[in-house]
Image: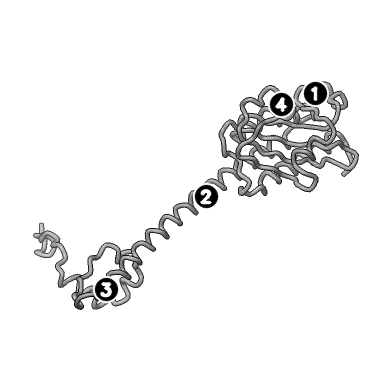
Amino acid sequence: MSKPSSAESAPARAPTAEDVADFLDRHPGFLADRPELLSWLTPPAQDAGDNVVDMKNFMIERQGREIERLKASQGELIATARGNISSQSRIHAAVLDLIGARSFEQLAETVTTDLALRLDVDVVSLCVECDRGSFPAASRSNIQGLPPGTIDALLGEDLDALLRPEADADPLVFGAAAGLVNSDALLRLTVGTSAPPAMLALGSREIGRFEPGHGTELLGFLAGVLECTIRSWLDLPD
């Protein structure tokens, strides 16, 4: 059996200051490619006389602060992206539930029960400005009937979505669950030219759950799918 060479048996030694200097001499662009390392270094102070500021240390400190700011900003972007992906997954699952309904009655029940779980909210209401008696009997308990003009009064005539971080929930919209709602999202549903005004309302007990600055594209997509499925089951024209 051969003996290990001296190079193999010798313990690895820590690099010396000369080793580091030699490495940097052979790789002059190393710190330019890894600027975050500058924040770990302590440069020598230079005594340039009374009332003279050491600008080099000032610039390095400022660069270190900028690197930390960029890291924090990057972390916020990653968190936002993950939140968007989660929201997208929830909306996609909710849409599949709507498409999978086998009747209008099942669709109405899916909206008011399953969607709350899918979207992680406390209550979901399907509201229509008409007498609930005009809908199939089995679905009437899942529809909130509203007096004419209620939806325009809540959303305004030109607004299709309203997100309220702090909401004084109306029992007309959320029924007996209105007391749970502290933040809500109201989405106009345009089912067809011959259909009465309708609205999808999402309510959460968490204050600030829905904010006006949040994008409404995903919620708008959900509302659009619901419009199409209602129109299909009730055989309504576009």
Q: Is residue 225 visible?
A: no
> In which quadrant of the rendered view does residue 153 lie?
top right
Residue 11, position in %: x, y? 12, 59
* Whether label 2 touches label 4, CB < 8 Å: no
Q: Secondary structure at mark 1?
A: helix
238 to 146, vertically: above or below: below
The residue nearer to you, when weighing 113 against 206, is 206
Residue 180, position in %: x, y? 61, 26
Q: Amino acid at mark 2?
A: Thr
Q: Secondary structure at mark 4?
A: helix
Which mark's residue is nearer the viewer, 1 or 4? 4
3D distance between C-alphas at marks 3 and 4: 67 Å
Left or right: 89 in relation to 235: left
Q: Tag 1: Cα neighbours inside 10 Å, few (<14), some, or many (≥20)?
A: some
User: Mark 3 highlights which residue?
Assistant: 53
Q: Is residue 162 visible?
A: yes
User: Mark 4 highlights which residue?
Assistant: 171
Reading the chain from its start, which is encountered first: label 3 or label 4? 3
